[in-house]
Image: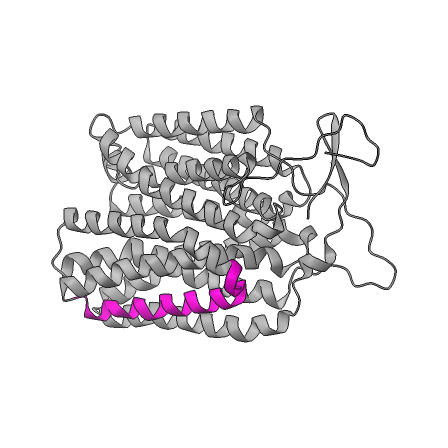
Amino acid sequence: MSEAGGAGRRRPRRPPAGGHPAGVLLVCAIIAGTQMTWGLVIPVLPVYADDLGAGAADLGAVVAAFGLGRLLMDLPAGMLAQRVDQRRLLVVAVLAVAVATLLTGAVTSVGQLVAARFVTGLAGGVAITTGQALLTHSDPDRLARTMGALQTYQLAGGALGPVIGGLLVGIDARLPFAVGGAVLLVLAVLGAVRRVPRWQPVTYPPVPNGAPAPRLWTAGLVSVSVVGFSIFFVRFGGQQYLFPVLAYERAGLTPAQLGLAIAVTTIASLALVGVAAKLTDRWGRRRVVVLSTALLGVVTLGFLGSASAPVFLAALVLTGVATAFTGPATGAYLADAVAPQKRGMAVGVYRTCGDAATLVGPLVLGWMLAADADAAAVVLLGVTTLTAAALFAVLSRRSGRPPSAASAVPVPVTVGSQTEPARP
């Protein structure tokens, strides 16, 4: 940190080439830990709910309560992220997720379990939205790689969670919640002690007379939110619901074979996130969003041949790979879609669209499966994603120059006892 003639001031150290600042990795780790606790309960909830005497409908309510909590908090969290210190909000939200997770392992009735999962969803919605909003204000020249790092950590956390939960539930159905809560407590303490960095300026200079005020509802935000809906639709409606059903009922796979295939898919996705980030920097965010979303729609249609195990497995791996390519580009484009002052709310809008898909997807696809319309369900997934790619290609043309480049005005912010220029 330096000023003209300011003796004793140190210039901020830039990260090594190809690396990420420690602050970025800390935020990614916090978000990944939150994601891990969500995945951790996937193999646990059916056993835990059964121990409490819950039926199938009760279990559905438990799952839906979490998703509803996330959906309800995405927009409020985005608004909060624009008005309060994002670092403190992130730490408090993760601490709340930790406490809610610990309390989940102490419930004694189905009603308490539903309430605990709802509260976990509320806190989790704030944590993920705030964490992503915070990262959108990091180094703009490395934004695609930062979003790639975030997706890598999220994929790793999401993959690790079910493994830990599956191992611990055999010991005690309450143990996974204790372990997950403890991990998040440690991350919350690290976030508080290690000082999650502040990239976002606290205040912005007033808009000059006659100049247009920064807008939230840009064509860029609308178009990338449409893409976000389609990606979440494939992830939660397809990968977590429809595809496992097709694996067992049409492809004839065993749970062990499906688990291995998912592991291979996750590893391939992790390996390609860095490549996706570099391509985003090289080809441009808009182009990669269009291509990766269209590719996701095409490979999803491969599940029409899921009666053949090899075809199913190929479609599963390719869908995971295509999904990995969408992450860095959509995250970086979302940051460019609005002025820095509006990024918190923009992330809230994007995640609201995505979480709406997590509720709509399983319901719609479940109804289609009940009607023996397996092929139509696959077509719906593919067509939805291809339509989203086409709409994005059209709408994003109207967004013009990313407003972040024109609207970001460095403003001094106070960090501890020192002052440094804020980066947009």
The reply, left or right, for residue 10 in relation to residue 303 is right
* Residue 7 screen position, x and y as percent: 80, 27
Residue 302 belongs to the span the image colors magenta: yes
Q: Does residue 365 appear anywhere in the picture?
A: yes
Q: Residue at x 76, y 50 (%)?
A: 409
Q: Quadrant of the N terminus?
A: top right
Q: Is residue 242 visible?
A: no
Q: Quadrant of residue 383?
A: bottom left
**Residue 137, horizontal then vertical, whole percent:** 62, 47
Residues rendered magenta in the picture: 281-306
Q: Nearer the viewer, residue 199 or 108?
A: 199
Vertically, is 364 above or below 28? Answer: below
| In magenta stretch: residue 30 | no
Front in this rendered view, residue 368 or 403 = 403
Task: Decide: is 254 above or below 304.
Answer: above
Number of numbered discs overlaid on the protein picture = 0
Q: Main secondary structure of the magenta part?
A: helix
Residue at point 34%, 63% (across, down): 364
Vertical arrangement, residue 179 with respect to residue 212, above or below: above
Give the percent coordinates (x, y) of residue 30: 48, 35
Residue at the extreme right: 209
